Every structure is written in structure tokens, then in C-alpha cells.
Image (tube, rainbow, N blue to C red):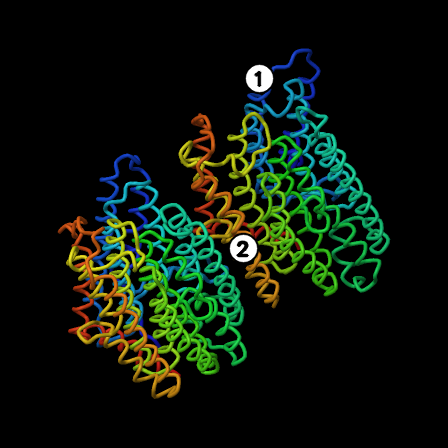
């Protein structure tokens, strides 16, 4: 039985309102006042960030359970509740979202094209993300999930780069096809639970038959798995990331893809543990293939953003593998990896964004020797690459360590294959770094200015977060563990 | 005296129609004056209908039932009429000499549909539906450059008359089986007879008249041509108001079998699936906005059927909610189209290019309306689909719901294409700046707020629709 502690002040709704109020405020600002729009956006994001940090520090991980709960009956006849709460699993996600939003807005400071619409859409997108992470009612989780999906189309199609219209359409349609599987599954669970509540914890208490669990689990896994870039449903991801503008890639790869894994963990695994047990071998198999596949295909890429895109597929495979092990270490590692990878990917896209803005190319053979002309910009990417490999001192080291310990124990062959994938990803990361940043100086880029102090701030923030949790993983793991241990004990 | 109160909305619209009939006898036409009268009368009509919303009673020898169900639909009909008349301020698509007849026929059609939703006797239903159909047969070809569009009018007429004939045949079979034309009594006797072929055939044929109005497969053939060939305002009226009446009557009629016939439910499921799939797939290739919306309406007929065939209180409530949401969303889209094509021509998708610059407000109204039709939260369209699918799943139709969701995803493609045109594409030649008058501005904002409010806070309206669904039995 999960303990629930009601909130004195609806802080979760407040965090959500920072994005919605930010959106509404921006709608009233005339489009010519771009500077004001950017300032308002950054202010809203900062308030959200401060609230999330405060929330993180106030969470009592000794007590565990669901805290800062808000629960109001929303639609009586169906049993829909406005039900928000934090525990060890979604708290790191909320923190991640606020960090990525804050740094993302700062990274796009130089945008001049249709600024008002861009920031309005970004806030709509992140409102959906916040909403899904904090919600504990299936209806609202689905609503926020879809809300976070549809702004992707205009964001990519209007401000994007390579093949933007194709990328935007493919991404939007593919992800919404995933929700075509999720909604029937949610409604099915609602019906089987007596058709009177969408409350996640009540449904967990009610429980479902083995057949229902197996059926719903696979639907939810595939539906959310599309967003989590589970192989082979990941093909929207590299195309979409490449096409998207920088902040959108940061938010998408950094946070949105975690929504998929979170959905699997929070809905599928919580409500259908028998289903999880039944399908876990398949989950592990797809995850391992994803890790190796992502690494191998990333090896062959020549476009920097494609490299990062495929490395994302690979890293999300690590998350999937961790979840499939059904063990404390595995799920701890998976949630930690969601956080660590989120920050790292945001840093990746942020640094590539700067390079692309200045050189107007992301093709590796055209770049070269950048560390000599742009040492600071290069350092950001190199730190991200090291984090991607899982070098100690980076947060992802701990995450991957935990996942692989659990994986090798639960799935010996798969675990070893995944380790091989890890080595291949190290290989391609280092190769990319070498080709882009080291080697001979390319005379074309000699005059490009390095990152000015103002624009360096968001990247430094991201680097600091990675290093901070790399050096003090306990601060993150205590929080995660407080929920994962009782969670796994239910299996 | 109370009888007058029960019949008040209808009386008012009879009065309005008579007034326009008298105006039409005048020698000189005064389009602007007629429009002012029309909007004034339609507005009062809406108020009158809202005031009568809690009336309950029987009229005309129990042929006519005024209950919450009928009154809600009358409000929706009156609302649709007000909005269409609001957009008829220029009405360049129709010859000015015919404006009076246009308003007359609109009022008569609204009157007929109001009578239809309250009718609970088979012949009354038939008379009402014929009255509304004949008004529409006259409205459809009433377009400038009539020679081009006569074909549309004839097509609509032929298919409509055929459906009416089929419906009459079905009604006669129902009468033969149940020995009464009073619907409440048929509800009592039919379920025990439903296993007999004559009863099922009678019911299905009787329903086909309404399927025609709703444009459900396979009675949808008229929709693309009629939508494209009618004047924009007439299309808007057909797409919004007449769908309400059709949905209401299908809900009343399917209640007749009381779910006792699995064969009939299977048939409805098949029709629903075909409707959704056919409508969505053919809409993918359309370039004319009205034609695309016609196919989309065929698909939406399928979605409403999913709620209706659940044949539970929740199913009917969800179908009523969906119909209301559909009215608002569809009208929002049509309003933008009518504003853009104010000389009355058929708008092509590529003509939407650059809309976000010409009028950000209209572009946003269009976008929210289309997202609502696609079923994206937090709009009323999403909540409508959610409710309809919930009702269906409660009866165990998992497969149907999955097909419905897949169709929703397919439909997103063509809605996105329109939004892409409005927000992304640059027009080849710059279009002139749009003058959006303040009334249109207020209406746009009101529509957007309505769509989002109903989507996020459905509780109040949902309780209302559930109360209405309860009065059905």
C-alpha cells in the first residue's frame, strides 16, 4: 500500500501553471517584442526550475511513498481525478524537465524567426511533459502525453532543418500511432477495474487477471515503446532529431523520450506485473538489439545530429534493459539513466546547436580541428561524449553500471551483448570526437568566434549537473531507491 | 397555456419563417436588411430555446415529446443556425434576389429538425424529416452560376428521395410488426420480436433515412459532391445543424431494439468501421477544403456510431457530447473558410497559405478546430472520442476501439496538411490582407474557449448529457 501525503500547498499544479501562464502571457505580447518574449520565457522556466529544485530537496526519501499529493474529483461519472504526486521515480524526471527547459530556452536566445509562436509552442510542449510526469490518473496521463506530442509538428516543420517537413510528419504520425495503442489499453484497464476510476493506485489495488495483464502490457509497452525508441519502432527518432531545431531536439531527446520509458514503468509495469513477467524476455531482447543496433548505425553516420540521434536510441535501450530485469539495481539504474541521459543529450544538442549556428554544417567530414578554433564549444561536446561513453565522474557511469550489473545477472547473453554495444558506442563516440574536434584545423572555420560567456551558461549548467550527480550519485539514488525497492518487492 | 410553452421554440421559428415568406413577396430585395432581421430572429430563437430547455411534456396526441434530450438538441440546432446566419453577412455565393428565400428555407429547416428531435411517432418523424429534406433540396442548388451546380442539387435530391422511400418502407414494416406507430410502445414490443427478419429489416431501413442525413457509409455518396457544390454557408449548415438532428434520431431509434439484437449491433459495427476507414482514407487525397471536410464528416459519422451502438446510458450520453463538440469544431473550421472565401468560391487547401500572417486569430481558430476534429487533447473533440471509446469498451468492443484510434491517427495526417498550409506555406502571390471585423473576432475567441473549456472541464456538460440519455427510456 503506497502511503500518500497530501500537499499543504499545491506545488505540483504551481509548477505546471508556470508553463501554462508563461504560454498565456506570451500570447498577449506583440510579436515584434522578441526580447520581452524571451525574457518572460526564461523567467517562467526559472521559476519552474527553482520550484523543482526545492521539491527535490524537500522530498523525504526516508519516508518514501507519494508526497505532495493533490487529489480532486474531476469527472464524477467516469471516475477521473485531478491527481498529482511525487515519488522517487517521477521526481528526478520533473527535475530533469525543469533543467532542460531552462537551458533549452537559454540556448535559443538568438532565435529571430517567429519568436512568439516558438516559445508559446515550447511552453505547451513542456506543460504536457510536466503534466504527464506528475499525474497519477490514467486519463490525465494520456491527455498530457498527447498534449506534449502535437506541438512537435509545428515546432519541427516551421523552425527545423534537414528534411523538416518529412521529419515532422513522420514523428507526429508515428508517435500518435503509439497513442492509438495506449488509449484502448487504458480504457480496457478502466473497464476491467469496474469502470469507475482512473486513479492509478486504486487500479493497482483492484488488480487484474493474468490474461488482462498480458494483453494490456504488450499494448502499453508497444505504444509507449514507440516514444521510448524501442527497436524496431525507433525510426522516427533520428530523422526527427535531425530535423528539429536545437531546443526542440534538447527537449525531445532529453525529456520526451523519457516519457515513453516512464509510461512503461509507471503504467504498464505498475498495473500489469504478471504481464511484465511474461513479456520481460521480449523487452530485454528488443532492448539489447536496440543498444547494439544504435551503436552500430551511429558508427556509420556522417551528420553530427544523426550520430547523437542513434546514440539516443542506444542509450534508451539501456533504460529498457534495466526495466526488463525487474530488479532493484536494474530499475534504479534505468531511472538514473533516464535522468543522466536526458541531461547529457540536452548538452549534446546544445553544443551541436552552437556549432551549426556558426558553421552552418553538421557534416563531420566538413568540420575538423574545431578544438583549436573553438575550444570552449568543443569542450562541451567532448564532455557530453565522455558522459555518453559512461566514463566515471559522469552521472551516466553509475546508471549504466547498475543496469549492466542487473542485466548480466538476469539475462547473461543479452547482458554481455549489451556490454559489447557499450564498447562499440565508445568507439564511435571517440571517433566522432576525433574527426570533428581534433586533427587538422580546417581553414574554413578559423574565424568562427568561440562561445561567448552569455551563451556558455546553459551548457555549463548542463555539464555541472552531469558532474555533480557523477560525483554524488547518492543524492539521486536515495530518492529513486525509496520508491523502487517497495515497487520491486511487489513482484 | 403550458402547451404553448412546450412548443415555444417551434412556434418562434414558424413565426420567423412566415416573416421571411412575407418579405419574399416584396418586389425589391434588401439583402442587408434581411440579414439583420435574420440574425436578430435567430438570436431570439436561440434565447427562446434555451429558456424552454427544462420543459417536459407530451403534445399532439402523444406524437410529440418534449424532454431534456430533445431540448438539448434544439439548443444545438438553434446555435448552429445562429452561427450560420452570422456567417451569411456577405453571402456572395447566392444571388441577392434569393437571399430572402435562403433565410426562409433556413428557418423552415431548423423548425423541421426541431420537430424531428421531439417526434416520437413514426409518421410525425417522417413528415418532419421530409420537411427538412425538402428545404435542403432547395437550398443546395441555390448557388450563383446555378448551371454549374444543378448537378449537385439533382444528385442530392435523387439520393435523398431514395433514402426517404427506403425509410418509409422500413416504417411500414415496423408498423406491421409492432401494430403501432408510437415509438414508446414500439420500444416495449419490438425487443421480443427482434429475432424476426421483418423487424430487423424494418428497423435498419427506417434508420437508413437518418444514416443518409448523417452521411454514414453506405449512404454517404452525396456528401462530397453536395459539400463542394453548395454555397459555403449552405454547406456549413448541412455540416453542422443537420448532423445534429440525424444523430439525435439515430440515438432515439437504436434505443428501439434495446440491445436485444446482436445481429443489428454487428451490422452497426460494420457500418461504423467502413465509415471511419473510408472517410479517412479518401480524405487523404483531397485538395478542396469542403470536399475534404465532407469525407471527414463521413468518418465522424462512424465515430458517433461507436458511441450509439454501445446502447448504454453512457454510450448515448457520449454520442450527445460528441455531437455537441462536433457542432462547435466543425463550425469553427467553416467559419474560417467562409471568411477566407468571402466571394463564395470553393476554397482550395493551397489558398490557406500564409494565413498565420494575414490573421493569426483565424489561423488559431482553424488549428484548434482541426485538432479537435482529429481528437487531440485538450479539446472537446478529444474528450468526445474518449467518452465514445470508453462506452464501447465497456461493452467489450476492444477491436472496434483500436480501429477507431488507428483511424484517428490516419485522420491526423490530412488535418495536419491543412494546418501546415495555414502556418507554413508561403503563398505564390501574396494574398490581400484580411479584414476581420470585431464580431468575428469575438466569436472566434468564444469558439476557441468553448472547445478547450469543454475539453478540460467536461463534467458539467457530461452530467447534462447523461440526464438527457436517461430520459430516453
What residue is shown at x 44% (from left), y 81% (from top)?
A280
Query: Left or right: where does residue A204 sit relative to residue B81?
Result: left
**Measured along the vertical axis of the image, is residue B179 above or below residue B147?**
below
Residue name at image x 31 percent, y 80 percent: A403
Residue visible at 31% across and 62% down? Answer: A254
Q: CA distance from mark 1 to mark 2?
A: 41 Å
Q: Which of the 4 quarters of the picture holds residue A381?
A: bottom left
State which quadrant residue B194 falls in. bottom right
Q: Position of residue B107 (x, y in %)?
A: 65, 29
Instruction: Choose between A55 and B350: the one closer to the eye.
Output: B350
> x, y percentage for residue B245?
65, 43
Chain identity of mark 2:
B
Residue A276 visible? The answer is yes
Residue receiving disc 1 = B33
Tell which tag, 1 or 2, sits nearer the viewer: 2
Task: Name the residue beneath numbered marker 2.
Answer: B385
| 1 and 2 marks in contact (CB < 8 Å) | no
Amino acid at each position: 500500500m503506497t502511503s500518500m501525503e497530501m500537499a499543504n500547498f499545491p506545488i505540483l499544479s504551481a509548477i505546471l501553471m508556470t508553463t501554462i501562464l508563461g504560454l498565456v502571457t506570451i500570447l498577449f505580447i506583440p510579436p515584434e517584442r522578441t526580447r520581452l518574449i524571451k525574457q518572460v520565457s526564461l523567467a517562467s522556466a526559472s521559476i519552474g526550475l527553482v520550484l523543482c529544485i526545492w521539491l527535490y530537496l524537500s522530498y523525504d526519501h526516508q519516508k518514501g511513498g507519494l508526497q505532495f499529493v493533490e487529489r480532486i474529483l474531476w469527472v464524477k461519472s467516469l471516475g477521473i481525478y485531478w491527481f498529482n504526486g511525487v515519488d522517487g521515480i517521477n521526481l528526478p524526471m520533473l527535475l530533469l524537465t525543469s533543467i532542460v527547459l531552462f537551458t533549452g530556452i537559454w540556448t535559443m536566445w538568438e532565435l529571430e524567426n517567429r519568436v512568439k509562436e516558438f516559445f508559446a509552442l515550447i511552453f505547451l510542449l513542456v506543460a504536457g511533459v510536466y503534466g504527464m510526469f506528475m499525474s497519477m490518473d490514467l486519463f490525465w496521463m494520456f491527455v498530457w502525453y498527447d498534449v506534449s506530442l502535437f506541438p512537435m509538428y509545428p515546432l519541427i516543420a516551421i523552425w527545423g532543418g534537414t528534411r523538416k517537413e518529412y521529419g515532422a510528419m513522420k514523428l507526429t504520425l508515428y508517435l500518435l500511432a503509439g497513442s492509438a495503442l495506449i488509449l484502448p489499453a487504458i480504457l480496457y484497464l478502466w473497464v476491467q477495474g469496474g469502470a469507475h476510476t482512473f486513479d492509478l493506485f486504486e487500479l493497482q489495488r483492484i488488480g487484474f487477471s493474468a490474461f488482462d495483464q498480458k494483453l494490456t502490457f504488450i499494448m502499453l509497452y508497444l505504444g509507449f515503446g514507440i516514444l521510448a525508441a524501442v527497436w524496431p519502432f525507433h525510426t522516427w527518432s533520428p530523422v526527427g532529431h535531425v530535423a528539429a531545431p536545437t531546443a526542440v531536439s534538447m527537449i525531445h531527446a532529453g525529456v520526451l523520450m523519457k516519457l515513453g520509458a516512464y509510461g512503461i514503468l509507471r503504467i504498464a509495469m505498475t498495473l500489469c506485473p504478471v504481464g511484465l513477467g511474461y513479456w520481460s524476455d521480449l523487452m530485454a531482447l528488443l532492448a539489447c538489439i536496440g543498444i547494439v543496433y544504435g551503436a552500430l548505425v551511429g558508427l556509420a553516420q556522417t551528420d553530427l545530429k544523426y550520430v547523437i540521434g542513434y546514440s539516443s536510441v542506444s542509450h534508451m535501450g539501456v533504460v529498457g534493459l534495466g526495466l526488463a530485469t525487474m530488479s532493484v539495481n536494474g530499475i534504479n539504474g534505468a531511472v538514473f539513466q533516464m535522468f543522466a541521459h536526458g541531461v547529457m543529450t540536452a548538452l549534446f544538442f546544445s553544443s551541436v546547436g552552437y556549432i551549426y549556428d556558426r558553421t552552418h554544417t553538421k557534416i563531420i567530414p566538413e568540420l575538423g580541428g574545431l578544438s583549436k578554433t573553438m575550444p570552449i564549444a568543443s569542450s562541451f561536446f567532448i564532455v557530453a561524449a565522455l558522459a555518453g561513453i559512461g566514463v566515471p565522474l559522469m552521472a551516466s557511469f553509475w546508471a549504466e553500471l547498475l543496469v549492466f550489473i542487473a542485466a548480466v545477472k538476469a539475462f547473461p547473453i543479452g547482458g554481455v551483448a549489451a556490454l559489447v554495444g557499450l564498447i562499440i558506442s565508445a568507439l564511435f563516440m571517440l571517433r566522432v570526437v576525433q574527426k570533428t574536434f581534433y586533427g587538422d584545423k580546417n581553414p574554413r572555420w578559423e574565424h568562427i568566434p568561440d562561445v561567448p560567456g552569455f551563451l556558455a551558461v546553459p551548457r555549463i549548467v548542463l555539464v555541472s549537473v552531469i558532474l555533480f550527480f557523477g560525483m554524488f550519485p547518492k543524492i539521486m539514488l536515495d530518492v529513486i531507491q525509496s520508491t523502487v525497492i517497495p515497487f520491486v518487492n511487489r513482484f | 397555456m403550458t402547451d404553448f410553452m412546450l412548443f415555444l421554440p417551434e412556434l418562434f421559428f414558424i413565426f420567423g419563417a412566415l416573416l421571411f415568406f412575407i418579405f419574399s413577396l416584396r418586389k425589391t430585395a434588401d439583402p442587408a436588411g434581411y440579414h439583420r432581421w435574420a440574425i436578430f430572429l435567430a438570436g431570439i430563437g436561440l434565447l427562446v430555446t434555451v429558456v424552454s430547455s427544462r420543459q417536459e411534456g407530451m403534445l399532439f396526441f402523444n406524437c410529440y415529446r418534449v424532454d431534456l434530450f430533445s431540448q438539448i438538441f434544439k439548443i444545438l440546432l438553434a446555435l448552429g443556425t445562429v452561427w450560420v446566419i452570422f456567417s451569411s453577412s456577405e453571402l456572395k455565393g447566392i444571388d441577392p434576389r434569393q437571399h430572402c428565400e435562403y433565410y426562409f428555407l433556413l428557418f423552415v429547416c431548423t423548425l423541421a429538425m426541431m420537430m424531428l428531435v421531439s417526434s416520437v411517432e413514426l409518421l410525425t418523424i417522417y413528415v418532419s424529416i421530409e420537411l427538412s429534406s425538402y428545404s435542403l433540396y432547395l437550398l443546395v442548388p441555390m448557388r450563383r452560376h446555378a448551371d454549374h451546380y444543378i448537378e449537385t442539387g439533382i444528385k442530392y435530391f435523387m439520393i435523398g428521395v431514395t433514402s426517404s422511400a427506403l425509410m418509409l418502407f422500413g416504417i411500414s414494416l415496423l408498423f406491421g410488426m409492432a401494430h403501432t406507430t408510437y415509438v414508446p410502445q414500439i420500444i416495449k414490443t419490438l425487443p421480443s420480436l427482434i429475432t424476426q427478419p421483418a423487424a430487423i429489416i424494418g428497423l435498419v431501413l427506417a434508420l437508413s433515412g437518418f444514416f443518409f442525413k448523417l452521411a454514414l457509409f453506405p449512404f454517404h455518396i452525396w456528401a462530397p459532391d453536395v459539400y463542394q457544390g453548395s454555397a459555403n454557408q449552405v454547406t456549413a449548415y448541412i455540416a453542422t445543424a443537420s448532423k445534429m438532428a440525424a444523430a439525435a434520431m439515430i440515438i432515439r431509434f437504436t434505443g428501439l431494439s434495446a440491445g436485444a439484437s446482436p445481429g443489428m449491433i454487428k451490422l452497426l459495427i460494420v457500418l461504423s468501421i467502413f465509415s471511419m476507414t473510408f472517410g479517412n482514407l479518401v480524405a487523404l487525397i483531397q485538395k478542396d477544403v469542403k470536399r475534404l471536410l465532407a469525407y471527414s464528416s463521413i468518418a465522424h459519422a462512424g465515430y458517433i456510431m461507436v458511441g450509439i451502438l454501445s446502447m448504454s446510458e453512457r454510450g448515448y450520453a457520449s454520442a450527445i457530447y460528441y455531437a455537441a463538440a462536433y457542432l462547435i469544431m466543425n463550425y469553427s473550421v467553416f467559419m474560417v473558410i467562409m471568411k477566407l472565401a468571402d466571394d463564395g468560391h470553393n476554397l482550395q487547401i493551397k489558398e490557406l497559405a500564409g494565413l498565420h500572417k494575414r490573421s493569426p486569430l483565424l489561423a488559431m481558430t482553424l488549428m484548434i478546430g482541426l485538432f479537435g476534429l482529429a481528437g487531440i487533447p485538450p479539446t472537446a473533440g478529444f474528450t468526445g472520442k474518449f467518452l465514445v471509446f470508453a462506452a464501447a469498451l465497456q461493452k467489450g468492443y476492444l477491436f472496434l476501439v483500436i480501429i477507431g484510434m488507428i483511424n484517428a491517427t490516419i485522420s491526423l495526417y490530412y488535418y495536419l496538411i491543412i494546418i501546415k498550409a495555414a502556418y507554413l506555406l508561403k503563398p505564390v502571390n501574396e494574398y490581400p490582407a484580411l479584414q476581420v471585423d470585431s464580431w468575428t473576432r469575438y466569436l472566434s475567441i468564444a469558439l476557441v474557449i468553448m472547445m478547450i473549456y469543454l475539453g478540460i472541464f467536461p463534467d458539467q456538460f457530461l452530467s447534462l448529457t447523461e440526464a438527457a440519455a436517461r430520459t430516453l427510456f
